[in-house]
Amino acid sequence: MGELIVLDSGLDVPALVSALVSLLALAIYALNQAGKENNDDDDSSPGGGLMQPTS
């Protein structure tokens, strides 16, 4: 006739550990990618880029 919904306010440790591990992996990935950016100008890659002067 009706549904029983249980609202559990307990701490979900496996989900918290999984979230922290994922956040740590994302932070390590982001820090490793920071030095490899390309500013789309002639000083970083041959062949030009988006910021070429027009004449």
Image (spheres, helix red, strand yellow):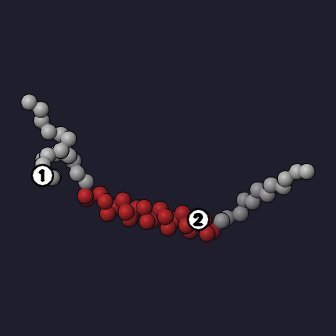
Q: Secondary structure at mark 2?
A: helix
The picture quadrant where one finds residue 26 is bottom left
In the drawing, what numbered circle is on residue 37?
none
Furthest-front residue in this view: 47
Furthest-top residue in this view: 55
Q: Which residue is mark 2?
A: 16
Front disc: 2 or 1? 1
Amino acid type at mark 1 = Pro
Furthest-left residue in this view: 55
| Rendered residue at 79%/57% (across/down) | 6
Q: How far across and how far down the image is residue 31, in percent? A: 34, 61
Q: Earlier in the sequence, mark 2 or mark 1?
A: 2
Q: Is residue 6 left or right of 38 when viewed as pictured? A: right
Between 5 and 12, the residue placed more toward the observer is 5
Q: Is residue 34 left or right of 13 when viewed as pictured? A: left
Q: Is residue 24 left or right of 5 when viewed as pictured? A: left
The local crowd at label 1, few if under 14, some if 14 to 19, many if 20 or more residues have their Cα within 10 Å, is few
The local crowd at label 2, few if under 14, some if 14 to 19, many if 20 or more residues have their Cα within 10 Å, is few
Q: How far across and how far down the image is residue 43, in percent? A: 12, 50
| Rendered residue at 15%/52% (across/down) | 45
The picture quadrant where one finds residue 28 is bottom left
Q: Secondary structure at mark 1?
A: loop
Amino acid type at mark 2 = Leu
Furthest-right residue in this view: 1
Q: Which quarter of the rendering shows the C terminus?
A: top left
Q: CA distance from mark 2 to mark 1?
A: 46 Å
Q: Which residue is mark 1?
A: 46
Q: How far across and how far down the image is residue 7, in percent? A: 76, 56
Counting the numbered discs, the total is 2
| Rendered residue at 12%/32% (across/down) | 54
Residue contact at pointers 2 and 1, CB within 8 angstroms: no
